[in-house]
Image (spheres, rainbow, N blue to C red):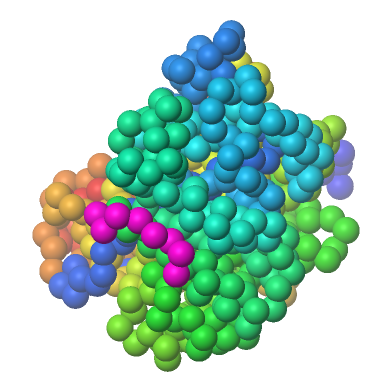
Amino acid sequence: MSKNFLLVTLALAFTGIASAADADVKLTIRADTPGPTIAPEIYGQFMEHLGRNVYEGIWVGEGSSIPNTRGFRNDTLAALKKLGVPVLRWPGGCFADEYHWRDGIGDRSKRPHRVNTYWGGVIEPNEFGTHEFFELAEMLNAKTYLAVNVGSGTVQEMSDWIEYITSPSESTLAKERRANGRDQPWKLDYVGVGNEPWGCGGDMNAQYYSDEYKKYALNIKTPRDNRPVEVASGPYGDGYEWTEVLMKNAVKQMGAYSLHYYTLPSGSFQKPKKGPALSFTEADWIVTFKETLKIDEMITKHSAIMDKHDPQKKVGLYVDEWGSWYDVEPGTNPGFLFQQNTLRDAVLAGLNLNVFHAHAERVKMTNIAQMINVLQAMILTDKEKMLLTPTYHVFEMYRPFQGATFLPAEIDAPPYTLGDVSIPSVSVSAARTKDGKIVVALVNTHPNAGATVRTAIPGAKAGKVSARVLTTPAMNAHNTFEKPDAVKPAAFTGAKRSGDAWTFSLPSKSVVVAILE
Ligand code: AHR
């Protein structure tokens, strides 16, 4: 074999140009049997005091040379507004269980400096606190989701915080809020009682936490017109035993129940390496998706346990931490969890969102981890520079799903197989948007083969399509501060109508979102 031939072959394999035959896929979208509403909150974000998420990512302070509005940087704010963030979870994560809200109110120059013991041991200046969080949420028109400190806090500390936020009265705490510059109470939409209480949030067992949960939930006291949903902390991944105990002991006191699951190419936090964000092989690519798709079975099994105790599905399942978790970028602080974001993350986001839609009866919120500069972020910054990640683009493309009505879809697609690993080659989700159009998301996981998706839509007549595609020649294509638009959506021209049927010709490794009307 000549050296040139070998080089060309390797290059084609890496870019995906060496294509396999297109998959032949049959799809039926049941517009005639609509399902539940897809809660907009499925598109929620998570913002922890971790690395450069809050500081630099969103808060730069009024004196910063980075253009800002009252301390919030203008560029990331504008990008988040375009995304339509429905809900923001804050201040952690593990940080929530060492956060004391009084540190973050009043004159910023006098706020105490603490050590962020979970994330890099850096100084937490408390410049971003309660007022800043609620102001940010108001600017983004996002609902507010607090994780309160159970691990190192008290019921009284939580009750005081909630009174400070929500009381319209003349109580001392309400007056203190006014003295600190906010006259009207803020809207508090969700209160999460602790975070990962089985781990960093207190190392508790399920029975103990469920008793603690009830005590805290009882003391979430707010005016009637400002009642937050009370969220009990659930397990990680397949921790079904935790769900059994929590449901048995505390279902009556719950508005919602959470679940965390991260996708690691290595499959386990116990392994020394999770896998790099950028230099990965096709074997890593397929295994990452196999790992991520496990969330479908987890949601199904947790939901089945919830169904036994809550057959009317009053308690929402909130996947309030999810996303990819790789080794940090070389040379960065290991405690900051800063990772790059490639086309692999875009495909992963599409797969997860499709799964969440399919469980819309039970899954009422999810929060990808995390919003800026941490794990599977929407946005990366480097001081005054900013870029949007491939994951951001998927969230933006999927916006029409927020609040849409889920439409069941039957798909017959061949598997994509590499060695002994097989996953579906094409994943789909469809819905009827609030303005009556049909939105279809198609994810082609195969890195070297396109897919021809022949689609029937009983119950809908559509004559027009507008669609966008996110795809790149390389599996690991990503945006950099030098080339921030290397991965961005483009117009999709592969949709063709024939009578009432549509054919979508998907490129390999792509996410397509089409609006039919
Ligand atoms: O998102 C990073 C961390 O992962 C969170 O702080 C914690 O809740 C989870 O273990």
- In magenta segment, residue 224: yes
Instruction: Please state the total of marks drawn on the protein image.
Output: 0
Nearer to the camera, 431 or 402: 402
- Please say whether residue 498 is visible from this viewpoint: yes
Residue 240, image quadrant: bottom right
In the image, farthest residue toward the bottom: 308
Residue 198, image quadrant: bottom right
Residue found at x 13% / y 69%: 459
Nearer to the camera, 399 or 102: 102
Q: Determine whether 213 is above or below 76 in the image.
A: below
Q: Is residue 172 left or right of residue 240?
A: left
User: What segment carries the magenta color?
Assistant: 218-225
Percent across and percent down for residue 158 are 53, 55
Q: Determine whether 204 is above or below 401 in the image.
A: below
Residue found at x 54% / y 33%: 105
Q: Determine whether 304 is above or below 178 in the image.
A: below
Percent across and percent down for residue 142 are 37, 42
- In magenta segment, residue 84: no
Q: Is residue 95 left or right of residue 299?
A: right
- Magenta stretch, overall SS: loop
- Please say whether residue 469 is visible from this viewpoint: no
Percent across and percent down for residue 468 are 36, 41
Residue found at x 49% / y 23%: 72
Residue found at x 70% / y 73%: 204
Nearer to the camera, 430 or 359: 359
Percent across and percent down for residue 479 are 60, 30
Q: Is residue 463 left or right of residue 10?
A: left
